[in-house]
Each structure stands twice: as C-alpha cells, then as structure tokens.
Amino acid sequence: MMEQIQINDSHELMDREGMFYKEFPSDFRQIRYFTLLIVQKAPPEIREINLLEQQISELIKNAVKHGNRSDQSKLVKVWYTFSEEKARIIIEDEGEGFQAIKDWNAFNEKRNSCLSNEDYEALADYVSFRTERSDDNDGGNAMFAALEYWNEGVVFTEKANCVAVGKTFPKKNTGIDLG
Amino acid sequence: MELKVRKSKHIYIVDIEGEMDLYNAYKLKELVSKMLDKGIGHFVINMEKVEYIDSSGIGALIYVSSALKKKSARLVITSVHGSVKKVIELTKLTGYFPLEDSLKEGIVALMKG
C-alpha cells in the first residue's frame, strides 16, 4: 500500500502506450455520465459494487471542478485500460495543477496517526482536507480513499495537472482444481 | 436521492433512498441543519436504501456528525452496506462514525441514553 501521493513524471503509471483515450468538456453536470462511458470498458469482475465507477468519478470530478474550474471550454483528457487483473487510468486537465500535494501528504500522515491511535477526538480535525478554494460541497476526503483503493499508486506530474492511478485485483479462483 | 423523516417517540429517523453523490448530498446537510434549529436532539440516519455514495456523500455524513456533536445532539447511522460500507472503509472512517447494523439496533442504542 502506498502511504503517499507521489510526484513523478516518469513513473510507469504515466505510460500511455496502448491505452484507450477519451476527452470531455468540463461540464460538472455530466461527471457521472462521462465516468460511465469509461467504466463500461471494464470487465464486470472488477466493477465490484460500483467501486471502480465511484473512484474514477472522484478523479474526473477533481479534474473538472478543481482543475478546470468547470470551464466548459477546457478539456479533461482520460487514458484508460482495464482487464480482469488490472485497472489503470490517467486523467489530465488544463488547470494550474494540484499545488497542495505536500500539504496533503503531511495532513494524511497526521490523519493516519490519529487512526492508528484510534484517537477519534483528534481525528475530527483531519476528516476533511481543505484549501482556500474548497467550498461547502467539497467532501475533502476523496484522495484518502483513492490512496487505499489504487494499490499500484496515485502519482501526479510535476505540474500536478495530471494524475495516474493503478490497481491490481486479486486473481479469482476459477474453481478448477489443477492439483 | 430522497429524504423522508419519521418519528419514534423522541427519536427522529431520516430515511435516505437513492444515490448520495456530488449532485445531491447537500440536501442531507440542509435537512439536518433545519432539524437542529428546531431543537431536535436524537437522530437516526438510516442508510438501508442507499446503494451509492461518493466523497460528497461522505462529506455530508461528516458534516452531520460534527454539527450534531457541537449541539450535543445524538446520532446513529444505520444499515450501511455494500459499496457504501466499502467507501467508508476505504476512507478509514468506520470507527469515526456512530454506525449500527440495523435500524432496530440504532434505536436501541439511542434509547440507552
């Protein structure tokens, strides 16, 4: 499990080779629809109870809302590939980038220490990551779950307007006993 | 997402039905704020019919938990299951939220005072 959001332009998760591609205008109302257009390429085995959809939707939302600030003339570009064992996705926006990655990682470290101490009083200060641009509708918790879900990592470029994530899924038992 | 409120003695049960996502999670915050203004002190948020939640939905639950705590109102969240349970686990908030397995157990927990 990765403990931190990484910054690395040449990380293997950034490799777009052989991936599908779609681009969308930054229309806030259509975030879940765009997500469905991507997730429909995934085999049912890895869509497990909407989780893949939910996790991808969070990343697209960040690109639309925080990256492109819902400016419909700006695009969100998505590269993606799915198999029964693996999901990978790269999402790029035309914004200024997620400049608070270091702050986020420091915040997450404190949050994790509250969690490991089961100190839920102190955790109350670390349930939601806010920046000066956060609004009331921002949960401020999406990336905590992202880091847990995407077990191959959550990696941003130096410019931080592009995020790549990956997850491997445990191989399902085929029920055929080869022994 | 639909919200319905019913009452069992002094306990107010908010039944949520549908998807708690970025488009409608704010409705729960608005409803609970109004109920708090009326002086209501015992809440059950019943999630039995919620099949999808995202970070905005989790954010609404965090908001409700902390707003109620500030007013010394009591809360249980009941019948979290499926992907909703999984998202709460991924966010590592299972121990933070006052979760009960069923509506019945939630009401019993609040009755204990």
Image (cartoon, coloured by chain):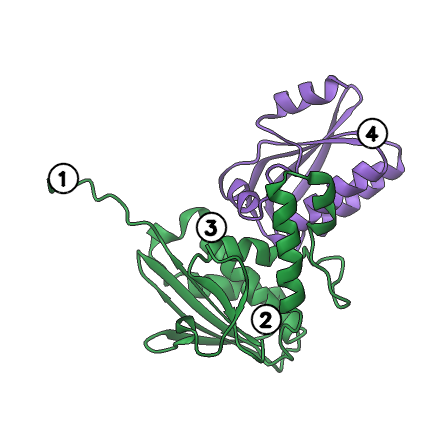
Chain colours: A green, B purple
Closer to the camera in the image, B20 or A119: A119
Q: Which picture quadrant has residue B99? A: top right
Q: Is residue A37 above or below residue B51?
A: below
State the separation of the CA atoms marked 1 and 2.
46 Å
Output the chain of dot 3.
A
Same-subunit check for callouts 1 and 4: no
* Amino acid found under the numbered disc labelled 3: Asn
Chain of the residue where label 4 is placed in the rendered structure: B
In what element is the residue under mark 3? helix
In three-dimensional space, the C-alpha distance between marks 1 and 3, rounded to whole angstroms, equals 30 Å
Q: Position of residue A120 (x, y in %)?
A: 69, 39
Earlier residue among tags 1 and 2: 2
Towards the viewer: A164 or A59:
A164
For this orientation, the residue located farthest to the left is A179
- Camera-near label (1 vs 4) is 1
- Read off the residue under disc 1: A177
Q: Which residue is mark 2?
A: A63
Mark-to-mark CA distance, 4 and 3: 34 Å
Respond whether the residues carrying marks 3 and 2 are from the same subunit: yes
Subunit ID for the residue under disc 1: A
Q: Is residue B3 above or below residue A3?
A: above
Q: Position of residue A89 (x, y in %)?
A: 44, 68
Whichever of callouts 1 and 3 sits on the residue coming sooner in the sequence is 3
How far from the left and from the top, in percent, is residue A152? 42, 61
Point out the tag, 3 or 2, that comes first from the N-terminus: 3
